[in-house]
Amino acid sequence: MNFLINEYIGLLKEDGELDALLLDILNSKGIVPISKPKKGRQYGVDIAAIGKDEDGVKKVFLLTVKQGNITRSVWDSGQNSVRQSLNEIKETYIGISLTPSQKNLPKKIILATNGELEQTVQTTWAQYAKTNKSKKLEYQFWGIDDITKTVTENLLSERLFNSEMRLLLKKTLAFLELKEYNLSHYNELVDLILDKPIKTKKPLLKRLKLLQICLDIVFKWASGNGYLKLALKAADKTIIKSFEWLENQGHFKEKYVHQEFFEIHSLRRKIGIAYFNKVNEHYFVEHSLQRYSKNQLEYSLTVWEEIGILANIGLTEIRHFQYHFSPKTQELADIFEKSALNLSDALISLINTNPPSHYPLYDNHIIDIEPALRFLYLTGKKEECIKWLKTLIVGIYDAKILKDFFPLFRENYETLVDYYLGNKKQDEKSSMLLTLLVDWSIILNIDEAYKNLKEIQKLFDNKLNLQIWFPKPETEQYYLKNGYSRESGKVKHSILLYDSLEDYKKELMEEVNLFSVEKEFSSVKMGYDHILSISGHYHRELPFPFFWRRFINNQQEQ
């Protein structure tokens, strides 16, 4: 386990990651920070804290944090060299940044790094520490082995991180290189960490912190040695399970629980953005995803998967924008808004440069199309929504006319191959995807699209059974679990498309008032409505109609 933690710590960046871990280490020792890390150190100091040292003496701890090995050039080359930072702490920071009472305490200056002190610098460091040491000033070096040892002893004790957990984590990391890995070991690890109810604050926080550390380890490992897409799935599992665990115990009544859960959500967001940054350039190249597919069918399925992934990353950005939308945090909100707009531009390009995005293969591509249309709509891309809606309808119509193919109501790859190649004659009788497209033709007020959808239904002699799934109150017990849309809720079937778009709209508006129980779910009332989208995408279950149908009545969002 020490090796894994050592590897994990070695991957941390100086700003925002390594210094955050060092804060946790200080807190675990009962040493309280008096200044937290900011962008750019203050007179050589990244972290300042006060507490009792190992000798029992109360001291001021002043940490300067570096990334990687301390080499001779890092030690004494340039404005940000180690020597320069240490000199600034001694000559400036102590004199002007500490209060009189803090100045009277003994000081310990710590050089901390997630690397090592190279042999060529060891003598220089020892001589510097000896020369500058005084009765009230001492120096200490924390290298990666020291940090790993402290983390293991104080944050990942045997009681919290037992041998079974360590084994599951090792297996997870070993299989992350495999594209088809189903994360079974990680899923088991998460279930094991959250295996029983906890009532008190400290043990609860330790479990949630441990969960974050495990997910972050998977993230770092996948970034360098595996598939980031797997880290995304691991993040979804983590947030769904942790939300369910906290909600079932009623812990969300505590403010600190909301803060800790938001940290998990933020880590999930970070993984999503890392994935986007890694693959973003492919979204702007014609047929870019085809090179990762063995045949045309796989190309199509890859495109639809990517649309769903990108849409959910985008919806997460919108959630963070909403969270920070206030005068005090407007700058942060602006960052998330800009990020969401960049993601929506990428999604539009992905759709335009990859033609399979016009030809759904399965009815359950509704799971990918719904969040994508919603995301584009929320980012103000109404015209692009209209364009894609029209091309989807034309694509479905042409596939039926030219190939006698219609999106399969039941997902089955072997059956798909037979139908697509014409080895078997298709006889689809139902569709939920068409119902979604009808809804969006109403939301976008596109009479032409509505009429074209009626033409598709005529190809089936008006016998195609249009359906839509609605949750019921008891769905709240299942919506975080696999199979929630099959085990709960109700299906409206035999939906009739009236001659007039306005007549259908009236019925739809009535249904919004009658069948929107999901807005009464506690998660939605707490502001965590995005958890429903995460669960639907993760489990490949039907989306909740209220989240797109609300646009019909909500003129402000339109």
Image (cartoon, grey):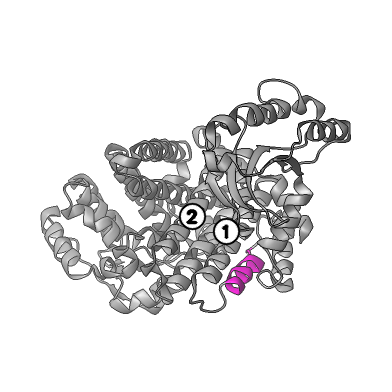
Secondary structure of the residue carrying numbered label 2: helix
The amino acid sitting under disc 1 is Gln
Residue at horizontal 54 percent and vertical 56 percent from the top: 421
The x, y position of residue 61, in whole percent, is 64, 44
* Residue 152 shown left or right of residue 290 in the figure: right
Distance of mark 1 from mark 2, alpha carbons? 8 Å
The amino acid sitting under disc 2 is Glu
Residue situated in front as seen by the camera: 66 or 454: 66
Q: Is residue 125 above or below residue 107?
A: above
* Crowd rating for badge 1 (residues with CA inside 10 Å; few <14, some 14–19, many 20+): many
Query: Residue 93, can we see it?
Result: yes
* Residue 410 shown left or right of residue 170 in the figure: left
The x, y position of residue 476, in whole percent, is 35, 74
Residue situated in front as seen by the camera: 84 or 558: 84
Look at mark 1 in the image and give the residue it sits on.
212
Residue situated in front as seen by the camera: 239 or 467: 239
Q: Tell whether position 191 is magenta.
A: yes
* Residue 549 shown left or right of residue 169 in the figure: left
Magenta span: 182-193
Look at mark 2 in the image and give the residue it sits on.
263
Secondary structure of the residue carrying numbered label 1: helix
Q: Quadrant of residue 1?
A: bottom right
* Residue 193 shown left or right of residue 5 in the figure: left
Q: Is residue 302 above or below residue 45?
A: below
The reply to whether the C-beta atoms of the residues labelled 1 and 2 are less than 8 Å apart is yes
Q: Quadrant of residue 3?
A: bottom right
